[in-house]
Image (cartoon, rainbow, N blue to C red):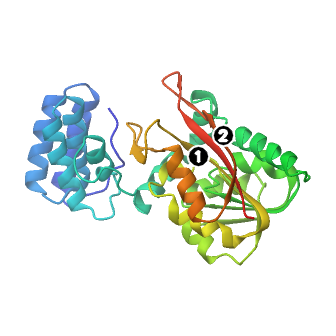
Amino acid sequence: MTTALFVSSGDLIADRRYKWAIDHAQRGDFESAVDILEQTVALAPHFATAWFALGAIRDQMGDRDGAIGAFARARDADPEDYHGARLHLARLGAGEATPAMSETYVRRLFDQHAPEFDEALRERLAYRGPELLLDAVQNACAALSRPMRFGTMLDLGCGTGLAGAAFRPCVDWLIGVDLSAGMVEKARAKGLYDRLAVDDVTRFLIGESDAACHLIVAADVFVYIADLRPVIAAAPRVLATGSLLAFTVETHAGAGVRLGATLRYAHGADTVRSALAAAELQLLELSETSTRTEKGAPVAGLVVVALRP
């Protein structure tokens, strides 16, 4: 059993009870864990971590209604949604269907996984998003009869620098931005980037100079953004005329956006096309692909390249 990182209630007795409950859950004694957590939240009604753990254990036991009730209390106790309770409510069919991920949640998630991120993606999930994007951009350049060379590239949601490593040989100046300071530190240690920033990707784009970039890449970043319109709308001003935007998304056969069991968003192809059209970007490629596997099966996705005409 896994739960979100611990955040103290401020009550030493409640904190001890929570940890006792988690010990029971990790041994497989879910009923005792639920009983102790119910006592814990009675003692500390605003203890978001305990409410979240109670929701996670009830969910694992098949108690959907009980899980929804606990996740709702975790959400109400923590407006910044550090634990991602809103996402679990959506996954269970309660509340907003595709809630936006809070910056606090995303930052915590990737700070937590930064140390083993590369190994987890490459070895356990067979991740190949940067390579697929590199091929797609090369194809676009060939179709446009231009060299595969860019003055300035912006790596949105750069993470530990996997996309940066793929594109560095064909870029003069490489910029990376990520919401997670832990990820940025890993990227900095690789010595790939000329400039790195810790920021939200849309906010960073809005603050950049006009026509500052010749290529913007987002490798498996938009799977954490429910509404693509603001981030895509912010890109054209930053792109020089004739420059490219390339990204990957997870997808599904229907319309609109869905939140999957993995707590990542899948965007329908028409939703992607609509966001690009609204930003007045010319679609060059939208191909079905898979950037990773989950439980041994490929995850449906799209690789997209668009031009600022």
| SS at mark 1 in the image | loop
Label 2: how many Cα within 10 Å (few below 14, some 14–19, many 20+)? many
Q: Amino acid at mark 1?
A: Asp
In primary-sequence order, the first of circles 1 and 2 is 2
Using the rendered view, name the quadrant where residue 278 is placed. bottom right
**From the viewer's perspective, is residue 155 above or below residue 125?**
below
Query: Label 2 amino acid?
Result: Gly
Q: Which residue is mark 2?
A: 129
11 sits left or right of 192 in the view: left
Question: What residue is shown at x 26% (from left), y 34% (from top)?
Answer: 23
Q: Position of residue 79 (x, y in %)?
A: 28, 65
Residue receiving disc 1: 220
Up/down of 31 relative to 280, above or below: above
- Residue drawn at x 32%, y 32% is 1
Image side of residue 88 versus residue 129, left or right? left
> Contact, CB < 8 Å: mark 1 with mark 2?
yes
Taking depth in this image into account, of 61 and 299 the one nearest to the observer is 299
If the image is split into quadrants, where does the C terminus sit?
A: bottom right
Q: Nearer the viewer, residue 41 or 201?
A: 201
Q: In the rendered image of this protein, does residue 118 appear above or below residue 12? A: above
Position of residue 50 measured from the top left corner of the image (x, y, whole percent): 21, 49
Q: Residues within 10 Å of mark 1 (few under 14, many from 20)?
A: many
Picture quadrant of residue 102: bottom left
Q: Residue furthest top?
A: 296
Residue 77 placement (x, y as % from top left)? 21, 61
